[in-house]
Structure formats: structure tokens, C-alpha cells
Image (cartoon, helix red, strand yellow):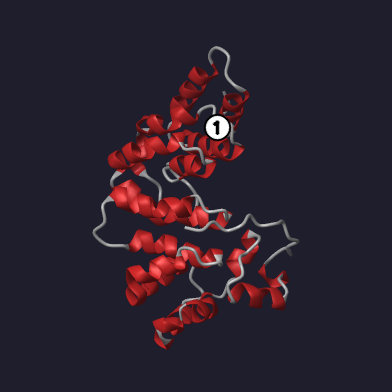
Amino acid sequence: MSKAKPLAPKPAGRGVKDIARERLAQLNAGEPAATLTECLAVDFAALMQVVAPQVGADAIGTMRAQAGLGISRRMALAAYILGERLGAEGFEQLKSHRSDTVRGWACFMVGAMPEMALRERLDRIRPLADDAHFGVREWAWLAVRPHLAAELGEALQLLRPWTGDASERIRRFASESLRPRGGWCAHIAALKSDPGMALPILEPLRADPAVYVQDSVANWLNDASKDRPDWVRGVCARWFAGKPSAATERICKRALRSIGP
């Protein structure tokens, strides 16, 4: 996959209503979003008409009619339509599109692909998990998380090598995709009751040099503290022992923010 160029910071309004009409037109024509607010402002029906008019007026009409759904449900719906109408060829076309929303649809197309081994699904999502755009990286783990949760043991085994990848985005995916609670997603009950299952993922990241990864590991542990506070305290006490790195200290302090040492 060809990598999108990192986005330069741009001024943004307080909400979708503050985005200029000209800017909305650019987003709906396939320009990448620079902020979360811009991501949320995209008109999926208008963008699909530009990107994949071959899906048909009925499909685009369905997207227009469902514009009131939450963003995650609309992403999944768009991916279902595109997968049904365009198939695997469509995925290959969309996964490198300029628009981050379109690449996000490609993420959910991976999640919707039927009868696929978890290893292959992770292989397909990996370039999108390493995308230059923050939004695509979030869609990548959200799109395949249900499959990871359903095959948790295998997921932990397959993601263990990702923790040693040269890309901080890939290392972060290994942690973020399996947070016990997470955001905008269903909880993983097995990890809420037994967070120790994920230590093969967390241990290699305990002193990760990237703040991006540190925040994910800290949030993972903070999630776990809602159900197993003593377990989180124990992990952090063990990690604090000896001479912990500054990264480990930062992770533990953030992990314990809801419960204290």
C-alpha cells in the first residue's frame, strides 16, 4: 500500500457546523481530513458517489437514508455495500485511496470478509494499521477487533511479534486492539476477568520509547483497573521494581490514575 503523507496541522472550528462549506465539499470529494471533527463531517453518500458510483444509486441512497447512524455503524454499512458490489477488487482499489474515510471503509471491508483465517485477516489489515493517518489507524483495529475477541488465544499469539515491530503504529495496534474496554467498541469479557492473559503483549511494551505506544499500554491497564484494580497495582509494582525506565514510570503512573498506587 502506498503511504499517505503525514497531515500538516490545520485550524479547525469547534464542531462540524463550523467547517466552511468549501472545506466540506473538499472532504466529500475525497480530500483527507485533518482533524477528528472533519472525519465526522464527511457525507458518506456524497463521497461514495465520487469514489464508487458503480455501486448504484440504490446503494448510495441507502447510505443517504442511514446518515443518522453512529459513525462506526455507518463505516460498517459502507464497507458491506462496497464489499457486496465491488468484491475483492474493490478492496484493492480503495485501500490506497487518498481519502482517509475511504481507506477506513477498506478496513471494515477486511473485517467483513467471510470465512477468513485470523492470520490472513491480520495480514490484510496490517498496512492500514500502519497508515499515516490517525483516523485510518483507529478504524483498522476497530474493524477487526470482533474477530480478535472471538479467537482471543490465537490473536494474542499472532500479535505477540507485532510488539517488536520497527513501526510504533504496529506496536500500538497490538495493545490498542485488545484493550479490555476500549472506546467505541464492545468490551472483551475474558480480558476484563483475566487481564493476565494479555501479558505476552503488554510485557514487551512496558518500556516502549514511543509515547503513542506508552499511552495505549497505560490505557490498557487503566481499563483493566476498572475490574481488577489489585492485578493492575501488582503489575505496576513489579514494573516499578529496580530501576524502571522513564517510559515505564510514565506508563504506570497513567495506568494507576483511576485507582492510585
Residue in front for this viewpoint, 219 or 167: 167
The answer to whether residue 4 shows anywhere in this view is yes
Residue closer to the observer: 224 or 163: 163
Q: Is residue 30 above or below residue 240?
A: below
Q: Please provide percent x and percent y for residue 114.
A: 27, 62
Q: Residue at x 41, y 62 (%)?
A: 108
Q: Answer yes or no: is residue 141 visible.
A: no
Answer left or right for 135 relative to 58. Answer: right
Measured along the vertical axis of the image, is residue 166 above or below residue 243?
below
Amino acid at pointer 1? Ala
- Residue 57, given in percent of the width and then of the height, sits at 43, 87
| Residue 14 point in image, percent of width and height | 72, 63
Residue at 61% across, 57% down:
5
In this rendering, position of residue 11 left or right of residue 54: right
Residue at image mark 1? 255
User: Which quadrant of the view contains residue 153?
Assistant: top left
Crowding at mark 1 (Cα within 10 Å: few <14, some 14-19, many 20+): many
Q: Does residue 103 appear left or right of residue 245 in this picture? A: left
Name the residue rendered at 57%, 53% in the picture: 132
Point out residue 188 in the picture as x, y percentages from the top left corner: 37, 45
Q: Looking at the image, which residue sits at the far front?
A: 2
Q: Which part of the image, by quadrant, shows the C terminus?
A: top right
Q: Residue furthest top?
A: 242
- Mark 1: which secondary structure? helix
